[in-house]
Amino acid sequence: MNSNLLFDFTVDKTNHTIRVTREFGAELNLVWLAWTTAELLDQWWAPKPYYVQTKTLHFAEGGQWHYAMISPEGDKHWCLADYKTIDPTKSYTALDAFCDEAGKMNADMPRTFWTNVFTANNGTTTVNITLQYQSLADLEKVLAMGMQEGFTMALDNLDELLLTIKK
């Protein structure tokens, strides 16, 4: 990550939320595409040495992103994001879940309600991310699974990717 770019990861246990503010050294349209297209998501979403493989992505209100996060040993961890609202290049919300390859949700795992807000800033883009959980136990479970470390690594992957696709 470029150390001059803003990064903040805050856990709010009282409200069962994580707030992430992350600035990227790229134009808004490019950052938006990186968050909303399978071809680009597959290149950065997982913390290395894991990688992502999209099964399906329909980025529209009511659409879904069904993907596997794959370990170096080939183990697949399936996830499903249901897109709720989309305001192109400004924001979107989604409810995600762990699932199986067929898309059946794993009721034993927490779901996360994502709110992502994108703001252009003269050649950089800030993404404000709010992750909301049903309970403190759900929040603590994802933190214990390494959410902060893994998501931070994935966002660093996005930094690297943006450098290679800038126009």
Image (tube, rainbow, N blue to C red):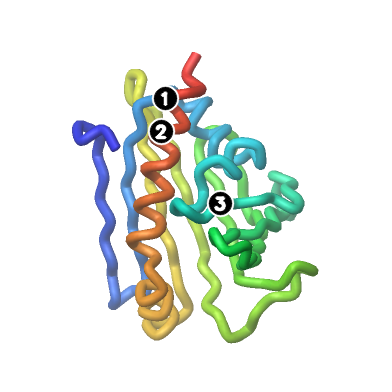
Of tags 3 and 1, which is closer to the observer?
A: 3
Element carrying mark 2 = helix
Residue positioned most to the right: 102
The reply, left or right, for residue 54 in relation to residue 102 is left
In percent of width and height, residue 154 lies at 43, 49
Element carrying mark 3 = strand
Residue positioned most to the left: 4
> What residue is shown at x 42% (from left), y 41% (from top)?
157
Which residue does the numbered mark 2 point to in the structure image? 160
Residue 14's quadrant in the figure?
bottom left
Q: Amino acid at mark 1?
A: Leu
Element carrying mark 1 = helix
Instruction: Give the vertical position of 2 relative to 101 (above or below).
Output: above
> What residue is shown at x 47% (from left), y 53% (from top)?
49
Please tell me which residue lies in front, 52 or 41. Answer: 52
Q: Dot 3 surroundings within 10 Å: few (below 14), some, or many (20 or more)? A: many
Residue 17's quadrant in the figure?
bottom left
Which residue does the numbered mark 1 point to in the structure image? 163
In percent of width and height, residue 120 lies at 39, 27
Q: Amino acid at mark 2?
A: Glu
Question: Residue 51 bears which disc, if any?
Answer: 3
For the N terminus, which image quadrant? Answer: top left
Q: Dot 2 surroundings within 10 Å: few (below 14), some, or many (20 or more)? A: some
Please tell me which residue lies in front, 96 or 71. Answer: 71
- CA gap between label 3 and label 1 equals 19 Å
> What residue is shown at x 44% (from left), y 38% (from top)?
158
In percent of width and height, residue 64 lies at 71, 55
The reply to whether discs 2 and 1 touch (Cβ–Cβ < 8 Å) is yes
The reply, left or right, for residue 152 in relation to residue 4 is right
